[in-house]
Amino acid sequence: MHLSGQILMALSLIGFLGCNNRQTALTVAAIPELHMVPLSQISVSGTANRPDIPLTRTIDGNLNTFMSTVSLNLGDTKTIIYKFSKVIDLKEIRFYENYVESTIGDLNGPDGAMATYNLGDMIIRGSMNSSDGTDGTWFDLASLTHKTQTFFRGDGAVSFESAETRWVKLEMTYNGDGAFGGTPSFYLSEIEFYE
C-alpha cells in the first residue's frame, strides 16, 4: 500500500578549471532512507471524527477505507490529531485519497473516476508537550490549500527538513473548496508518517 523506501543517490559534479590544468571530481552521496512510523504506534482523535466513518480508518493500513466529516458550512474548521507513542523526528507525511469523485469522468482513476484532494485549507502543526491534543504549545509545520495543492489524484507528500514532535494536528478549514459532495465533507483514506 505505501511507497517502498528507496535509497536515492545524489550526484554532484564539481569541476575545477585552471589556466593550464583541468580536473573534474565526481562525488556520490547517499540520502538516508526514510522509515515509516508503525501504525501500531499512532493513535488518532479530533473534531473531524464521524462515528460511522471514523478517523481510525486513516491509520488502518487499508486504502479501501476512508474517513469523512459531517457536512461542512463555510468557515467550519475540523481537526485530525495524531499522537505518537514516542517523540519522532518527522521528515515526511504521505497522504492517500481513494475516495472517488465519479462526476469527473475518465481521468485515469478507478472505474473511470478520479479521487481528489478533499482536505480544504489545511495547516499542519506539531507539539511536544500537549497532553490531549488540544492543550500545550503548537508550532506550524506546513500549510496546504485546495487552490495550490498538486496532489495527484489526492495523493501526495509533505516533506520537512526535520521536526521533532510527539503530536501532529491537521487543522482543516472549509472556505468553499477542497471538500466533496452536495453537502461537502472532508475525506482522507490513509496517512503515513516518516522519520
Image (cartoon, helix red, strand yellow):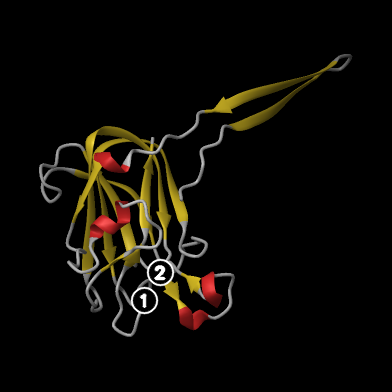
Residue at point 52%, 75% (across, down): 113
Q: Is residue 50 left or right of residue 162?
A: left
Please name the residue that numbered disc 1 is placed on.
180
Q: Nearer the viewer, residue 34 or 41?
A: 41
Which residue is outermost to the top? Answer: 20
Q: Three-letter amino acid code at disc 1?
A: Phe
Considering the image in quadrants, where does the C terminus appear? top left
- CB atoms at circles 1 and 2 under 8 Å apart? yes
Asked whether 34 or 12 is in front, the reply is 34
Q: Secondary structure at mark 2?
A: loop
At which x and y percent is residue 17? Answer: 80, 21
Which sits earlier in the primary sequence, circle 1 or circle 2? Answer: 2
Which residue type does callout 2 highlight? Tyr
Above or below: residue 20 compared with residue 33: above
Q: Position of residue 134 (x, y in %)?
A: 12, 51
**Which residue, given by chain and number where applicable, does mark 2 sit on?**
99
Alpha-carbon neighbours of circle 2 within 10 Å: few (<14), some, or many (≥20)? many
From the viewer's perspective, is 25 left or right of 172?
A: right
